[in-house]
């Protein structure tokens, strides 16, 4: 399984960015994708998750109402639309994946690092004040 993120960059506060996570290598088309971020000096934090099985989505309180996650099934790409960006959103953003059918119990914890088996390389997002 391979995950490739793209779309990071630098923006002013209040701006928008859209991150992409291209997924390849799953044997079954049921998986969960999470977006995490790690700010300098902080722990990795889960911000959003989506299930390919039923489309259910989750958001952390810190990004709810500003970020939106979506899945293009045909392109096997997950997007994270980030609006109203704040300087505290500055971090390296990672997408992560887990095969749903073999790991049902883990899916109850969409923001745990241990839920996911596969990780992308990360993409930097910098928000200037």
Image: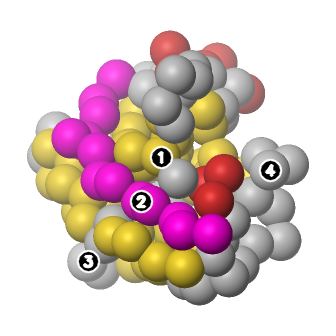
- First-in-chain label (2 vs 3): 3
Q: Name the dominant secondary structure of the magenta segment.
A: strand
- The secondary element bearing badge 4 is classed as loop
Mark 3 vs mark 1, CA separation in Å:
26 Å
Residue shown at 66% from the left, 51% from the top: 88
Mark 2 vs mark 3, CA separation in Å:
23 Å
Residue 86 locus on image (x, y percent): 68, 65
From the image, which quarter does the C terminus lie in? bottom right
| Other-residue count near label 2 (Cα within 10 Å), few / some / many at <14 / 14–19 / ≥20 | many
Mark 1 vs mark 2, CA separation in Å:
6 Å
Image depth: mark 1 or mark 4 in front? 1
Q: Which residues are magenta?
A: 117-129
Image depth: mark 4 or mark 2 in front? 2
Mark 3 vs mark 4, CA separation in Å:
28 Å
- First-in-chain label (4 vs 2): 4
- First-in-chain label (1 vs 2): 1
Q: Is residue 36 visible?
A: yes
Mark 4 vs mark 2, CA separation in Å:
16 Å
- Residue 75 image label: 3
Asked if residue 16 is positioned above or below residue 49 in the image, the reply reads below
- First-in-chain label (1 vs 4): 4
Query: Is residue 122 rendered to the left or right of residue 100?
Result: left
- Residue 125 image label: 2
| Other-residue count near label 4 (Cα within 10 Å), few / some / many at <14 / 14–19 / ≥20 | few
Q: Are marks 1 and 2 in contact (CB under 8 Å)?
A: yes
- First-in-chain label (3 vs 4): 4
Q: Mark 1 highlights which residue?
A: 91
| Other-residue count near label 1 (Cα within 10 Å), few / some / many at <14 / 14–19 / ≥20 | many
Q: Mark 4 highlights which residue?
A: 62
Residue 51 locus on image (x, y percent): 57, 53
Residue shown at 53% from the left, 66% from the top: 127
């Amino acid at each position: 399984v391979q995950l490739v993120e793209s779309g990071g960059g630098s923006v002013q506060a209040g701006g928008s960015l859209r991150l992409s996570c291209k997924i390849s290598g799953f044997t079954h088309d049921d998986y969960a994708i999470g977006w995490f971020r790690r700010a300098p000096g902080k722990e990795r934090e889960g911000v959003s998750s989506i299930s390919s099985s039923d489309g259910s989505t989750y958001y952390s309180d810190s990004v709810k109402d500003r970020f939106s996650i979506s899945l293009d099934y045909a392109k096997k790409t997950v997007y994270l639309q980030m609006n109203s960006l704040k300087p505290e959103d500055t971090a390296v953003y990672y997408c992560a994946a887990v095969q749903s059918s073999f790991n049902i119990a883990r899916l109850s914890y969409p923001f745990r690092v241990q839920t996911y088996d596969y990780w992308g390389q990360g993409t930097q997002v910098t928000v200037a004040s």
